[in-house]
Amino acid sequence: MKNRLFRDLNGYLKEIFGQKVYKITIDAGLSCPNRENGSGCIYCNDRGSGTGLFREGLSVKEQIERGIEGLKRRYNNVNAFIAYFQSYTNTYADVKSLEKIWSNVRDFREIVALSVGTRPDCVNKENLSLLNSFSGDYKIFLELGLQSTDEKNLNWIKRGHSLEDFEKALDIATNFNFDIVVHIIFGFPNDNVQSAVEMARYLSKRPVNGVKIHLLYVSKNAPLKKLYEEGLYTPITRELYTDMVVSFISHLRSDIVIHRLTGDAHKGELIAPLWSADKTGILTEIRNKLVEKGLFQGKEINI
Ligand code: SF4
């Protein structure tokens, strides 16, 4: 790890497939129990944090076709894709429906992996066994939204599941042939560098293969906007966010693949913090801070 700062997704995919692999984000038209039974997570928009393409009338197959065509137009040598079921909760349906949805990938020979984003309280042996049945032909990423290990934070964002739910999901998922990728958020009201270190320690002790770090931002059409406008939520500063990410990386087990380091709102939907729109600048800043401090993934793991 000493000659690279962290284990990033592109490098990992290249190790497996020998080429760059491109992601196609898919909205399968599913729903989410947290939206059906309540108002949803406070940062979630009405597209279930996804593209909204299903509602616009595009089937899963059409979304994949469009995704592949668009990427091939934009870049050269584009030959391998991940079908990323992103919007809402992608195990929130009966197994017959899920099989139909996921089987769409079989029509596209250049798809090499499936990535399924879901909530910890929506996985069970049945739906994960079904997902596992694709693992003979595809690399499988199971993306579990944990967001925080602190129950206070989970309640504040109205997440609708507990840390215990996440641990149960992890227990089930480890029986299958998946890469387990955990989504976490930085930017809760009481977040600080120490909370990032604690999160890294927590994940490093568990059978986790990947992590996605999101920044908590306020977007149009999300309930968090009201709290922000009423002065009840102050977004994290750029400096604290990048410090948290740097400390998280240096305390994270070195084999865990870092799938993303920040999050960005859909075009025209970001309300705050506005600095989060500068994704390239933030990534550069994180890398620069790691270099300046002589840190890399796992460097401080025993400290
Ligand atoms: S679990 Fe996902 S889709 Fe459901 S409300 Fe939360 S962010 Fe939105």
Image (cartoon, grey):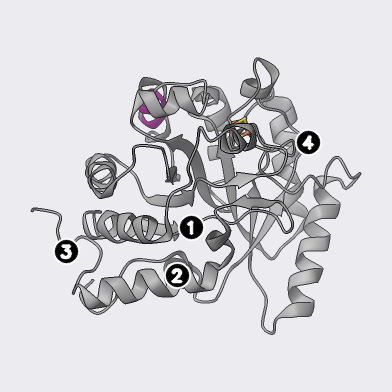
In the displayed structure image, the side of residue 78 where residue 17 appears, left or right: left
* Residues packed near mark 1 inside 10 Å, few (<14), some (14 to 19) or many (20 plus): some
* Residues packed near mark 2 inside 10 Å, few (<14), some (14 to 19) or many (20 plus): some
How far separated are the C-alphas under marks 1 and 2?
8 Å
Q: Tell me, for residue 299, which label it has, or none.
A: 3
How far separated are the C-alphas under marks 4 and 3?
42 Å
Between label 1 and label 4, give the one nearer the viewer: 1
How far separated are the C-alphas under marks 3 and 2?
19 Å
Single out the residue that lies furthest toward the top. 37
The residue labelled by disc 1 is 262
Of callouts 3 and 2, the N-terminal one: 2
The residue at the point 65 percent across, 26 percent down is 92
In the displayed structure image, the side of residue 173 where residue 100 appears, left or right: right
Q: Quick check: is the Cβ at mark 2 less than 8 Å away from ligand 1? A: no
Numbered disc 3: secondary structure:
loop
Q: Tell me, for residue 29, which label it has, or none.
A: 4
The residue at the point 49 percent across, 76 percent down is 18
Numbered disc 1: secondary structure:
loop
What kind of residue is marked 2?
Leu
In the displayed structure image, the side of residue 210 where residue 274 appears, left or right: right
The residue labelled by disc 2 is 283
Q: Is residue 7 magenta?
A: no
What kind of residue is marked 1?
Thr
* Residues packed near mark 3 inside 10 Å, few (<14), some (14 to 19) or many (20 plus): some
In the picture shown, does residue 123 fall above or below 208? Answer: above
What range is drawn magenta here? 166-170
Of callouts 1 and 3, the N-terminal one: 1
